Image: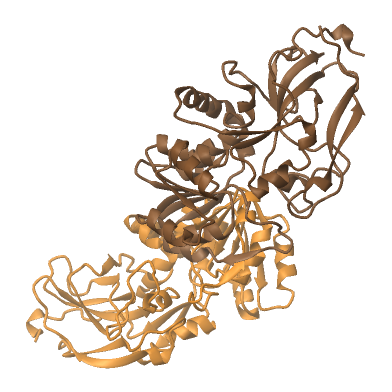
Chain colours: A orange, B brown
Amino acid sequence: MTHLPHTNAQVILKSRPHGIPQSEHFEVVESALPALDAGQFLVRNAFLSVEPAMRGWVNAAANYSDPVAVGSVMRGFAAGVVVASRHEAYAPGDQVMGMLGWQHYAVSDGSTIRRKVLEPDLPLSLSLGILGINGVTAYFALTELGEPRAGNTVVVSTAAGSVGSAVGQIAKIAGCRTVGITGGAAKQRLCLDEFGYDEAVDYQRADFTQALAKACAGGVDIYYDNTSGPISDAVLPHINKGARIIVCGTAAVPTWEPWPTGPRVERHLLNKAARMQGFLVWDYEHRYEEAIARLATWVREGSVRYREDFLEGIDSAPDAIAGLYRGDNLGKRLIRLSSGVDDGAGISLSKTP
Amino acid sequence: MTHLPHTNAQVILKSRPHGIPQSEHFEVVESALPALDAGQFLVRNAFLSVEPAMRGWVNAAANYSDPVAVGSVMRGFAAGVVVASRHEAYAPGDQVMGMLGWQHYAVSDGSTIRRKVLEPDLPLSLSLGILGINGVTAYFALTELGEPRAGNTVVVSTAAGSVGSAVGQIAKIAGCRTVGITGGAAKQRLCLDEFGYDEAVDYQRADFTQALAKACAGGVDIYYDNTSGPISDAVLPHINKGARIIVCGTAAVPTWEPWPTGPRVERHLLNKAARMQGFLVWDYEHRYEEAIARLATWVREGSVRYREDFLEGIDSAPDAIAGLYRGDNLGKRLIRLSSGVDDGAGISLSKTP
C-alpha cells in the first residue's frame, strides 16, 4: 500500500517563446495535489512525451490548437498508471495515455485520456511513440494521404525520427521503395540498418543534392515531409506524375514571424498534376485503435522497429524540446519519471487526503 | 463546288522566347499545301484558339509537353470544317476541333482531332471555349479536385476569364457562394452582371487585401487558381479546414528562370489539413464528352454564360498571346479566319491537286 502524495511536480510555461522554446521558457515547480472529486481519477505519469509540435503549442501564432497559457502546466502527452480513482471506468492499475501534461501526477475526469493501453506485453512507453500519436500519424498520413502502391518510390524527411522511421517501414510493408533523408552519418546508418530504407541520404553533406537526385533517379511518387524547408525544395523537382506530398511538420522553419519564403511549389504541382496536403492526426481520432492494432502486430512481428531516447527525470523537461530541434535525440524522445510498471497497484482510495 | 487551295498560311515559331512570347517570336508564312495521302483529310480552320498555356508550349523549360520546335507551325487548338477527305471517318462538312495548329489549313490523319463537334445548334467557336478545353478544364478541375458542396465558398482567380468564369458559374450551379478575383472595374462588373458571382474583388485596387478579407469573412473552401502569385498569397491565409486549392495555371509568373519565390504554403496546408493540387486537363480526355454534354445543356439553358473576344485574320496571331497576358481581352480569345459555316461542303476529291 502506498500513501498518495500531497504534492506534485509540474513543468510550467514561464514565458512565451518566439520560435523554438528553450530551457528559460519553462520552470519546474512544486504544487499541492488536490483531492479527487467524484468522477475524477489520479494518474501517476511514467513517461512524458517530447514532440516537435510542442513548439506550435507554446507559440502565440494562429495554429491548429490554442496556445498554452503562460503560467500553466505545459501541455503534453504522457503515459502512466491510475493510482486512485473515483471514476467508474478507470481503476487503479489501469495504464492510460493522454494529454496529461508535463507533470508527475495528473487529475483527470477521462476527457484528457486518449486511450487505455491494451498491450500489456509491450512497454508502456510505446504508447507515446510507435503505438501512440507518432505511429498513428505515420500510419494514416502514409496510407490515407500517400496512397502507397507497390513499386512506388517514397521519400521521407526526418527519416530516422519517430514518425519518419515508421512511415518508411510501413511503406516497405506496402511494397514501396524507400529513400530516407536524415542528418548525420549515425542517423544515416540507423535508416539503413534499423529501419530498412533502400537508400539513405545525409542532408548535412555538401553533395546532398546530387545524392538525392541519384537516389530518386526514377522519380518520387510520395514525399512525406516534416521539414518545410530546403530539403523539400530539393525533393520537389523530382516528383513523378500524380505524386502525393504529405505535409506533416515544419521543423526547418524556426519562426513564422516573419513568414518565410521559398521556391514556389505551384509549377511542380501543375506540371505533374501532383498534390500537396496537410495532415492533422486529430482528424483520425475515431480510427486510432485500428492503426494501433496493426502497428502492435507489426512491432511484435519485428517488421516495424523503433528507437527511444530517454531523458531522466522531470528536471530534464525544460531543455527537451530545444534538444529535439538541435537533433540531440536518436529515436522517440521521452522523459522517464518512473518505470510505469506496477505503480499504484493496490492503492486504496481511503488514503486520499 | 470550291477549288481546293494550293497554298497555306501558317504561323511559325521564329525564335524561342524566355517568358511571355511576343510578336517578334512569330512569323506568318505562305507554304505549299501537300496532296492528301490515303487516310488523311483536310480541315479549313475557322477559329484558332489563344491560350495562356501556349507560353509553356514555346518555352524550353521542362513542362508537361515537349516545346514547339523553332521553325515549325505554332501548336494550337483550332476548330474548322473538313473540306476534303481520304479518311473513312471524316467527310466534307464535318465540324472538328483539335490540335490543328495556327494555320489556315491542316492536314490530319485523325490523330490531331480532339472531337467532332456535335452541337450544330451552337456556334462552332464555342468548341474552343466553353464547349472546349476551357469548359472541360473548369468542369473537371472544380468537380473532381474541388469537390464543391452546397454552401462552400469558392474563390476564383482570373474570374472573368474563359476558364475562371465557367468555374464560378458551375460552382453556383453546385450551390456554392462565389467570389471572383479579377483586374479592373470592367471585368469586376462582368463578374457580377454576367457570370453571377456573389462578390467580385479587383486585385488592381490598393484595398485589394481588405476587400478580399471582407469577401472571404467566412473562410475559403475552394480556391481555383490560375495565377500562382500575389493573388494566391493573399487568398491562402483565408482557407478553411479541409480546403481544396486547385492549381490550374501560373499566369502571374513571367518566367521560371530564375524560379520565383513566394510565402511558404506548407503551414497553411498543415494548419487546415488542406490540399493543393495541380490540374492537367489531359488526364480527363476519356471523359470530355461527359463534360461537354453537361456544359452544352447549361449553355442552352442560360445557366452558364460566356464571352468571346475575336481577333480578325491570321496576321493578328503573333501578338495574340502577349495581348492575353496584357489582359487585352474580355472573354475567350480567338482568332477568326472565317465563319466556320458551310465551308467546304460539297468539295469533290477529284479537285485535289
Instruction: Residue B261: give x, y in percent of width and height.
Output: 63, 66
Instruction: Residue B160: give x, y in percent of width and height.
Output: 53, 42
Is B4 situated above or below B330?
above
Q: Quadrant of residue A225?
A: bottom right
Instruction: Residue A223: give x, y in percent of width and height.
Output: 58, 60
Is B312 situated above or below A234?
above
Is B188 situated above or below A114?
above
Q: Judge by depth and name the residue closer to the eye, A10 or A253.
A: A253
Q: Judge by depth and name the residue closer to the eye, B199 or A231.
A: B199
Is B39 on the left or on the right of B213, as rendered? right
Quarter of the picture containing the N terminus of chain B is top right
Visible in this render: residue B39?
yes
Q: Residue at x 71, y 54 (%)?
A: A218
Quarter of the picture containing the C terminus of chain B is top right
Q: Residue at x 88, y 9 (%)?
A: B351
Q: Residue at x 64, y 30 (%)?
A: B128
Q: Judge by depth and name the residue closer to the eye, B291 or A51.
A: B291
Is A348 situated above or below B11?
below
Is B280 on the left or on the right of A47, as rendered? right
Instruction: Residue B47: give x, y in percent of width and height.
Output: 71, 28
Q: Quadrant of residue B317?
A: top right
Visible in this render: residue A221?
no
Label total for image: 0
Is A344 on the left or on the right of A271, as rendered? left
Q: Residue at x 34, y 44 (%)?
A: B151
